Amino acid sequence: MTAKCFADTNVVLYTIGKNSRKAEIARGILAARPVVSAQVIKEAINVCLRKLGFERTKAYAFADAVMKLTDVLPVDETTIRRSAELAIRYQLANWDALIVAAAVLAGCDTLYSEDLQHGQVLANQLSVVNPFITA
């Protein structure tokens, strides 16, 4: 079975960031065609519009480019119910729990994220990896 990874919103956004080291790492992750959820795409659009000052056409073009490089999964009733279980079990914030639930339900074994504890294993299957930690 091929290992599947999930990319959190921060990883997606670093592909267009000013930090060249992080951008290179993030682009490498996206080149491996990770899984993302619709939440990741919508959060990225929101950051582009509100924090980065993108025009709508540019923000949506970025989202489209990301969707072409990833496998996008919906956030549905099953995801929401699983996220509630995970939020309670691991004391996760709601939005983080939705990310974790989507990754778990997709059968991923790695979650690339800066927002969760590096090295943590969730739901006995998902390892959190902060790809930007320097050794």
Image (spheres, rainbow, N blue to C red):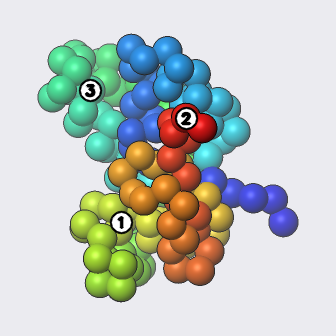
**Residue 114 visible, this orientation:** yes
Residue type of the residue flagged with mark 3: Cys
- Vertical placement of 46 versus 37: above or below? above
Which of 30 and 89 lies nearest the eye of the viewer?
89
Marks 2/3: CA distance? 27 Å
Query: Residue 98 — which label?
Result: 1
Earlier in the chain: of badge 1 and badge 2, it is: 1
Image coordinates of residue 122 in percent, x first then y, are 51, 74
**Disc 2: which residue:** 134
Q: CA distance from mark 1 to mark 2?
A: 27 Å
Mark number displayed over residue 71: none
Residue 64 in picture, x, y percent from top left? 46, 30
Callout in the foreground (2, 3):
2
- Residue at point 75%, 59% (across, down): 3
116 sits left or right of 107 in the view: left
User: Label 3, on which residue?
Assistant: 48
Marks 1/3 in contact by CB < 8 Å: the verdict is no
Q: Earlier in the sequence, mark 1 or mark 3?
A: 3
State left or right for residue 103 relative to residue 39.
right
Q: Nearer the viewer, residue 92 or 63?
A: 92
Disc 3 packing (10 Å; few <14; some 14–19; many ≥20): many
Cα–Cα gap, marks 1 and 3: 21 Å
Q: Is residue 7 above or below residue 96?
A: above
Q: Nearer the viewer, residue 128 or 42?
A: 128
* Quadrant the N terminus occupies: bottom right
In the shown orientation, is residue 98 left or right of residue 6? left
